[in-house]
């Protein structure tokens, strides 16, 4: 496989247009088109940028070999696998968020029941006020813990997936 075909294949594997690749390399889409059609060859600095952008070696781009297609397919599969794993992590994080919100709501309801009927029955204004104060402060603590936990999960997305693996 020659350089032109490699550039074309790498660009298409990323789902990019010639214009998008040109923007990444600070060249026009016409330059990319000429490279892909074999009418022109990228300058050395652009070749180095291409290799870095597509995460391949310049040797891979320049030299033709029998293993090129296999290398390309392996790179594509690795990229797809990474996308799948990231998607699974996002799903797990979403599930965790939903479960934690549900548990928080159940805790708030339980706190309400305990403060209203068990700990402080309506014997006067002082007891009702204390029950409401406990309900409000307990609810704030539960909601704060929920927000903090979900914030940590979102800022450290591997924490849920690494616990399961």
Image: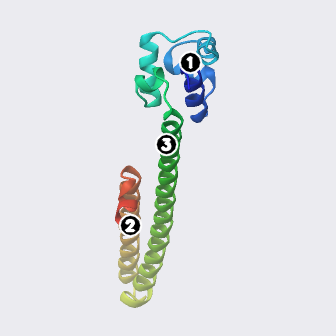
- Residue 149 seen: no
Residue 100 placement: quadrant = bottom left
Tell me whether the residue at label 2 lies in contact with that at label 3, contact meaning CB atoms closer than 8 angstroms. Answer: no
Q: Which mark is residue 74?
A: 3
Where residue 137 sits: x, y (%)? 36, 69
Which of the pair 29/63 is nearer the observer?
63
What separation in Å lies between label 2 and label 3 (alpha carbons)? 27 Å
- Going from N to C along the chain, the mark reached first, 2 or 3, is 3
- Going from N to C along the chain, the mark reached first, 1 or 2, is 1
Mark 2 sits on what residue?
164
Mark 1 sits on what residue?
22
Q: Secondary structure at mark 1?
A: helix
Where residue 52 sits: x, y (%)? 41, 26
What separation in Å lies between label 1 and label 3 (alpha carbons)? 25 Å
Q: Is residue 139 above or below residue 32?
A: below
Which of the pair 41/131 is nearer the observer?
41
């Amino acid at each position: 496989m020659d350089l032109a075909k490699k550039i074309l294949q790498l660009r298409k594997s990323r789902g990019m247009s010639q214009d998008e690749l040109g923007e990444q390399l600070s060249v026009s889409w016409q330059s990319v088109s000429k490279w892909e059609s074999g009418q022109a060859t990228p300058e050395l600095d652009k070749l180095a940028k291409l290799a870095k952008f597509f995460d391949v070696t310049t040797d891979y781009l320049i030299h033709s070999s029998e293993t090129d297609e296999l290398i390309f397919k392996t790179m594509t599969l690795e990229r797809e696998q990474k996308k799948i794993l990231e998607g699974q992590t996002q799903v797990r994080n979403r599930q965790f968020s939903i479960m934690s919100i549900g548990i928080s709501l159940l805790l708030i309801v339980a706190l309400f029941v305990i403060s209203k009927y068990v700990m402080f029955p309506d014997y006067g204004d002082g007891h009702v006020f204390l029950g409401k104060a406990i309900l409000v402060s307990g609810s704030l603590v539960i909601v704060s813990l929920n927000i903090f936990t979900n914030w940590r999960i979102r800022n450290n997305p591997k924490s849920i997936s690494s616990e399961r693996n």
